[in-house]
Image (cartoon, grey):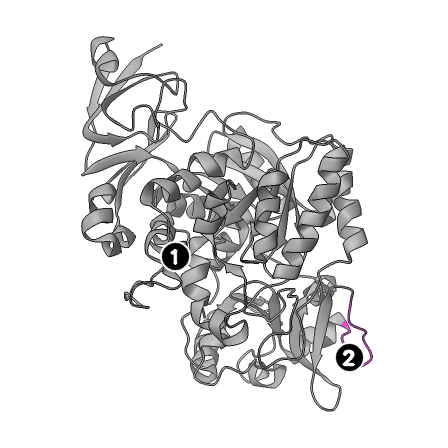
Amino acid sequence: MSRTLLRHDRIWTGDIGQPWTTALLVEDGRIIEVGSAALDAGADAVVDLPGALVMPGLHDAHIHTEWVARSLSSVDLHEARSLDETLGLVRAHEAGLAPGEWLHSGRWNHNIWAVPVQPDRHSLDTVSGDRVAALSSVDGHTIWANSLALQRAGITRDTPDPVGGEIVRDADGEPTGILRESAQELLDVIEQDQAPLRPWLERAQDLLLSVGLTSITDIDGEETRAAYAEMHAEGALRLRVTKCTRDPDLELAIEQGRRSGQGDDRFRVGPVKFFSDGALGSHTAHMTEPFIGHEGCGIAAMPYEVLLGRTLLAVQSGLDVCTHAIGDEANRLVLDSFEAVRAAGHDAVLRVEHAQHVRPVDLPRFRTLDVIASMQPSHCTADLELADQIIGHRRLASYAWRSFLDAGVRLAFGSDAPVEDPNPFYGLHAAVTRRRADGSPLGGWRPEERITLDEAVHAHTVGAHEAVGRTDVGRLAPGQLADLIAVDRDLWTLEQSAPADIRDTVVLQTWVDGELAHERT
């Protein structure tokens, strides 16, 4: 086998015993020596890496790549600051669509509009023409549908709310076009002729490699699984992909004999994804107390007995579990279900996805039950004003990375893209500063929850891989897979002098298996 020596004056390895080195010797996709041993071992080729720093490739522990891919072909509304601006963007996008093509995705966010009131079908009707429109909110937990979509789905004033969802109605009892949580699935009966996913997924792969992601845990469905499997079989999969199974596909996964960890170094079976509640922006996170200014405490996405039964079925079938929980009540219930898993003797990898608002009394339960907190730092900086407005200063651990680590809880970081930008350096910046790109709020939001750069990168590398049962990648050390990135600035120097600049890091090269997978031109 040929050996390649990768050299740089400043390589951060992520290895506690030897955090810095100047050389990596790679053979057959793995690092076999570092430092002076690598320099002395002999190599067939020598590569001097560019930039100011080399570090391990990053792993996004929670990303929706089908949604990211589809978003590349849809209207992007997440920066719109009013209903009128949003409608103008929809109108312009609609004019370029083929006849009969849906208006989809969107990522609208009424919480940042000048008048933060959820829209209705009548306003969407004015710009959607004669086509179905079903625009997803930025958090993916609400759909804004036009009248034609409701008509084709058979949704009327007499349609009951599904379990775990809500058809929002006006004062006269008529559907407004806002469908929350499981009510979104009522639109699935409408036939939709979508473009093939794979070409868009390949474009998304290029995007992810360009921002320094060498591994991902994908949360989307069976079409995404099939596209990735096809790409892998044809040698076109350049990322490492751990593929989750959605709750509705659990029985299919069991029938096919899937087990978490099956696969190879590039494409593997991951956990089953369940939902315990909704999202903060849609006011559907399941809270112990009502939101400020609202009567409700959010939505339980499924009754606890169902959640428990589905969780046990998954682990009994050899599948790990990651369960979405944002509100403090949702987190409590998920931990209750995981306690039952441990009491039954199962050692599956268990994760809470988001873990945004947790009662302090529940923090040590994560450690006791060996539950990983899979979190997205950019959610904190995106949501901080909303959290203050509708949750306030309750005694909760909110986006509490420091508190989790101090309690001995393992962290895994991701983006939840396209809810947030997939660029992991945005997340690292948020974790270290708890400030937005513009520097606000001064001193950081609840700054006592800041963590160090070492801790944040660990959560985006080793921690994210451990969250899918992997210990063979994430560090630049002998025996590890050779996934690394070369960047334009030294993050560890910036942490002390100018942490705000971490966010603007540019990836110059991305290497997977010791081979160049992306180079900035």
- Circle 2 SS class: loop
Q: Inspect the image, locate mark 2, and give the three-letter code of the amino acid beneath it.
A: Thr
Q: Is 36 a magenta residue? A: no
Closer to the eye: label 1 or 2? 1
Q: Position of residue 310 (x, y in %)?
A: 77, 46
Badge 2 crowding class, 10 Å Cα cut-off, few under 14, some 14 to 19, many 20 or more, is some
- Of residues 131 and 61, the one drawn nearer to the viewer in this rendering: 61
User: Which contiguous range is marked in magenta?
Assistant: 154-162
Label 1 and label 2: CA atoms lie apart by: 49 Å
Q: Is residue 252 left or right of residue 201?
A: right
Residue 6 visible within the image? yes
Residue underneath mark 2: 156
Q: Dots 1 and 2: beta carbons under 8 Å? A: no
Does label 1 or label 2 sit earlier along the sequence? 2
Predominant secondary structure in magenta?
loop
Picture disc at residue 301: none
- Circle 1 SS class: helix
Q: Is residue 147 above or below residue 329?
A: below
In which image quadrant can residue 489 be found? top left
Q: Is residue 176 above or below residue 105?
A: below
Q: Inspect the image, locate mark 1, and give the three-letter code of the amino acid beneath it.
A: Glu
Quadrant in the picture for the C terminus: top left
Residue underneath mark 1: 448
Residue 253 visible within the image? no
Q: Position of residue 311 (x, y in %)?
A: 73, 44
Q: Is residue 49 left or right of residue 356?
A: left
Q: Position of residue 21 (x, y in %)?
A: 24, 25
- Of residues 174 and 327, the one drawn nearer to the viewer in this rendering: 327
In which image quadrant can residue 317 be found? top right
